[in-house]
Image (cartoon, rainbow, N blue to C red):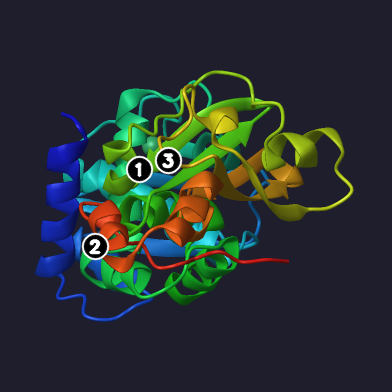
């Protein structure tokens, strides 16, 4: 099984449960998976949940001391195991928090359950519309995370996918790029970020990690810092990054907009008449300016 049928199954599951508002009603989803949720407050800090089946019923226990968005993700991850009929490969009956948060050594089945969980938590039909209506920024990601009661990481990852501008979301853990998601507009510009490499020097994320005076920052950095051969027509990309010290992680949102197009081109426009200008602009997708100065 790969991601595509998993996403289809998640969308079907959301439809079958008649989910028509957000934040998604996780209890309703659980009951559709014949699962009963039990919240416990006596579990270890590092334990997120447990699940077992008995007589055709599934029992999902979650750690009530953890943040609500973490509990919701744990429940949906466990529901994914039930719906996709994928055995738990590394956590057995118990699921630890680092199993869910860390991007290292993730068996494929576990990744697929996370994909299912994210699709349920941030359903396409609501989320794509919300993302389409807002400017790119970490602030926007955080607001959506609140609205959907999802983690900033899950929300940011899907934000980049549905963004209507060239945009990438990067998760860095222990100074290495562990996860990247990107919009089709960025892929069309051949904007690829390699997974597994060290965090590039000169990036905002690098600065935050090496000199953590702030928890988050925004800047415009040279496009070849993030993209091997740069991005044609763009000397600069916008980057906003934030640290998550608890997990030794850093999240980075990288995007392009019209205001970042090559300065020399902008200068040339001054010398051209309107007709030439329009011709020059022909075939270039106009992205609304999403620039945000601090
Ligand atoms: Zn699992």
Judging by the rendered image, the residue that carries numbered circle 1 is 186
Q: Secondary structure at mark 2?
A: helix
Q: Position of residue 19 (x, y in %)?
A: 21, 75
Number of the label disc, if any, that sits on residue 258:
none
148 over 53 or under it: above or below: below
Q: Residue at x 25, y 64 (%)?
A: 275
234 over 230 or under it: above or below: below
Residue 98 is left or right of residue 181, and the answer is: right
29 over 90 or under it: above or below: below
Quadrant housing residue 233: top left
Q: Position of residue 40 (x, y in %)?
A: 56, 61
**51 or 82, which is in the foreground?**
82
Q: Position of residue 116 (x, y in %)?
A: 28, 48
State the quadrant of the N terminus. Answer: top left
Q: Residue at x 64, y 26 (%)?
A: 200
Judging by the rendered image, the residue that carries numbered circle 3 is 233
Most extreme residue toward the bottom is: 21
**236 or 170, which is in the foreground?**
236
Mark closest to the chain's N terminus, 1 or 3:
1
Residue 208 shows up from this direction: yes
| CA neighbours of label 3 inside 10 A, class few (<14), some (14 to 19), many (20+) | some
Mark nearest the camera among 3 and 2 is: 3
| CA neighbours of label 2 inside 10 A, class few (<14), some (14 to 19), many (20+) | some
Question: CB atoms at circles 3 and 2 under 8 Å apart?
Answer: no
Marks 2 and 1, how far apart at CA: 19 Å
Judging by the rendered image, the residue that carries numbered circle 2 is 124
Q: Residue at x 10, y 67 (%)?
A: 16
Question: CB atoms at circles 2 and 1 under 8 Å apart?
Answer: no
Q: Position of residue 9 (x, y in %)?
A: 13, 50
């Amino acid at each position: 099984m790969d991601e595509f049928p998993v996403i289809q199954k998640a969308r079907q599951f959301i439809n079958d449960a008649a989910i028509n508002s957000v934040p998604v009603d996780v209890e309703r989803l659980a009951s559709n998976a014949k699962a009963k949720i039990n919240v416990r407050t006596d579990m270890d800090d590092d334990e997120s949940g447990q699940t077992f089946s008995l007589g055709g019923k599934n029992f999902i226990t979650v750690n009530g001391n953890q943040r609500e968005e973490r509990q919701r993700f744990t429940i949906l991850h466990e529901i994914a195991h039930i719906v996709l009929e994928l055995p738990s490969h590394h956590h057995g009956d118990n699921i630890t928090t680092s199993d869910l948060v860390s991007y290292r050594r993730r068996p494929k089945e576990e990744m697929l359950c996370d994909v299912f969980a994210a699709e349920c938590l941030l359903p396409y039909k609501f989320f794509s519309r919300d993302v389409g209506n807002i400017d790119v920024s970490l602030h926007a990601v955080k607001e959506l995370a609140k609205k959907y009661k999802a983690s900033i990481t899950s929300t940011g990852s899907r934000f980049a996918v549905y963004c209507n501008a060239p945009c990438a979301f990067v998760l860095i853990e222990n100074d290495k790029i562990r996860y990247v998601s990107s919009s089709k507009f960025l892929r069309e510009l051949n904007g690829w970020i390699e997974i597994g490499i060290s965090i590039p020097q000169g990036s905002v994320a690098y600065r935050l990690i090496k000199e953590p005076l702030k928890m988050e920052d925004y800047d415009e950095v040279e496009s070849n810092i993030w993209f091997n051969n740069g991005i044609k027509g763009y000397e600069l990309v916008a980057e906003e990054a934030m640290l998550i010290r608890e997990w030794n992680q850093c999240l980075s949102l990288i995007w392009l907009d019209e205001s970042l197009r090559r300065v020399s081109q902008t200068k040339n426009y001054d010398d051209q008449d309107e007709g030439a200008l329009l011709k020059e602009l022909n075939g270039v997708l106009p992205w609304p300016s999403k620039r945000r100065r601090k």
